[in-house]
Image (cartoon, rainbow, N blue to C red):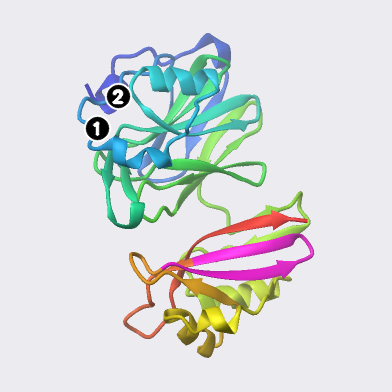
Amino acid sequence: MTLRLALLILPLATPACADLALSSQVPGLDLVALADLPAAPQDQGEPDFCSHLFVETVTTPGGKDAAAKGWHVTAELPLGDLTAVSFIGHATPATSGTCELGAGNVGFYSGSHLVALAYGTEADALLIGSLRPFGTGLRILSGDVVAGTVADLSHDGSALAVIAPATEEPVCDGSGIVPGIEGLPIDKARDLLLQSGWQPVPGDPAQQNLGWAGELAAAGVPEVEDCSGTGFAFCSFRYSGPAGELSVVTAGEGGEDGSLPGVVRYGVDCR
């Protein structure tokens, strides 16, 4: 039984949060009240090859509920007075240690009680892979081999919502802002970062002489640190600002139009 079918027959109300308003503003994602999580699909692909993407030790009551029913937990994070648990039901290994994560969902738990579920309305869409903290809420990452941003989650105590991704992220308790650089060529992302107070940290010329990194430095992005020579051709870049240190990662060697590689993720090490 698939999760989508199970939603039609399981109780949709839960006394613990019966007055919680639910909404989704993102096409392809739905958010519904749900009291009992169905079992994971029987065909799970090859999850053993993708276990490095799963939570190593599940600790929350909600995560344990999902794991007990055969799902693979990818994140357990607080969201207000709830716990958000992302989990997937199918995994397909890909190149360079990556995986395609399918049948993804986010369960919202009050203690050990499931109160709501976010899920993809199209069976083959990889819209939910994992979660990460984002501002005062959470961000949903896709199940693609190179995970991208899908939506944000907000919860103010009375309402839980799936919303369109914010255009910027406050970081380090609001002492810094990371603009919306995901998907942008690194030179365009660089311009936005400069405007937001992030300064490039020049990379090591000796390291840049190895492969693709030298070409990026010559193209006007001297903060490139290094690039992988195989797989997705990931490259790393570093910036510094009042809030801390910012690392940026791109994938690929740019577009057919001559554009530089696009940003796929970033992370901040706060001061």
Q: Quadrant of the N terminus?
A: top left
Residue 165 location (% of width, % of height): 52, 52
Q: Label 1 belongs to which residue? A: 44
Local secondary structure at mark 1: loop
Q: Is residue 196 above or below residue 60?
A: below
Query: Which mark lies nearer to you, 2 or 1?
Result: 1
Does 67 appear in magenta? no
Residue 188 location (% of width, % of height): 54, 77
How far apart, in angstroms, are the residues tagged by discs 2 and 1? Answer: 8 Å
Q: Which amino acid does label 2 sit on?
A: Ala
Say whether residue 132 is visible: yes
Residue 218 location (% of width, % of height): 52, 90
Query: In the image, is 243 to the left or to the right of 34?
Result: right
Say whether residue 222 is visible: no
- The residue under the point 46% across, 80% down is 210
Asked if the residues shown at circle 2 and circle 1 are in contact, with their CB atoms under 8 angstroms apart, the answer is: yes
- The residue under the point 53% across, 21% down is 109
Residue 269 location (% of width, % of height): 69, 56
Q: Where is residue 65, by image quadrant?
A: top left
Q: Label 2 belongs to which residue? A: 40
**Residues in magenta, as a range:** 234-249
Q: Which amino acid does label 1 sit on?
A: Gln
Frontmost residue, 231 versus 136:
231
Query: In the image, is 91 to the left or to the right of 195?
Result: left
Query: In the image, is 91 to the left or to the right of 173?
Result: left
Does 242 appear in magenta? yes
